[in-house]
Image (tube, grey):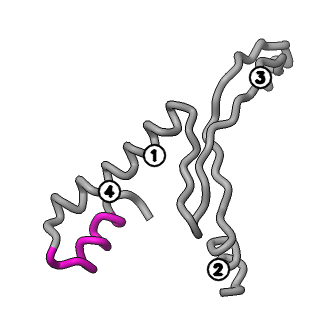
């Protein structure tokens, strides 16, 4: 599912909301999650999962084409851990 499909589904299920307002709500939610993670905070959505940021240390890597050693800088990457309800549903337990 892509963002526009999510917006359309929410708008269809809530006819009292204007699609423009639904789009604004969805964008606000995503922006708040992104801003919180950019500030190093963890975002937890009960039953769904938790978004966090993990730090990857600098290391020596390899260029796959030439095999030469390449220095890879330290970086921060997003991490998602599924919640129990989502994990159970994916595995057909709920």
Nearer the camera: disc 4 or disc 1: 1
The disc, 1 or 2, on the residue closer to the chain's N-terminal end is 1
Residue identifier under label 2 = 89
Residue identifier under label 4 = 26
Question: Splitting the image into 4 quarters, where does residue 7 fall?
Answer: bottom left
Q: Residue at x 86, y 19 (%)?
A: 67
Q: What are the residue bounds of the magenta stretch?
A: 5-16
Q: 10 Å neighbourhood of mark 3: few (<14), some, or many (≥20)?
A: few
The picture places residue 84, in percent across and down from the top left corner, at: 69, 71
At numbered mark 2, what does the secondary structure look like: helix, strand or loop?
helix
The disc, 4 or 3, on the residue closer to the chain's N-terminal end is 4
Q: Residue at x 56, y 38 (%)?
A: 41
Q: Give how far apart the Cα atoms at labels 1 and 2 are.
A: 23 Å
The disc, 2 or 4, on the residue closer to the chain's N-terminal end is 4
The disc, 3 or 2, on the residue closer to the chain's N-terminal end is 3
Nearer the camera: disc 1 or disc 2: 1
Q: Residue at x 62, y 43 (%)?
A: 52
Q: Give how far apart the Cα atoms at labels 3 and 2 are.
A: 35 Å
The picture places residue 80, in percent across and down from the top left corner, at: 64, 51
């Amino acid at each position: 599912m892509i963002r526009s499909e999510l917006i359309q589904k929410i708008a269809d299920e809530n006819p009292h909301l204007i699609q423009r307002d639904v789009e604004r709500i969805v964008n606000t939610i995503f922006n708040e999650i992104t801003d919180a993670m950019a500030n190093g905070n963890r975002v937890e959505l009960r039953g769904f999962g938790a978004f966090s940021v993990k730090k990857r240390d600098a290391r020596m890597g390899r260029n796959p084409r030439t095999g030469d050693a390449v220095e890879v800088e330290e970086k921060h990457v997003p991490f998602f851990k599924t919640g129990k309800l989502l994990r159970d549903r994916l595995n057909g337990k709920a």
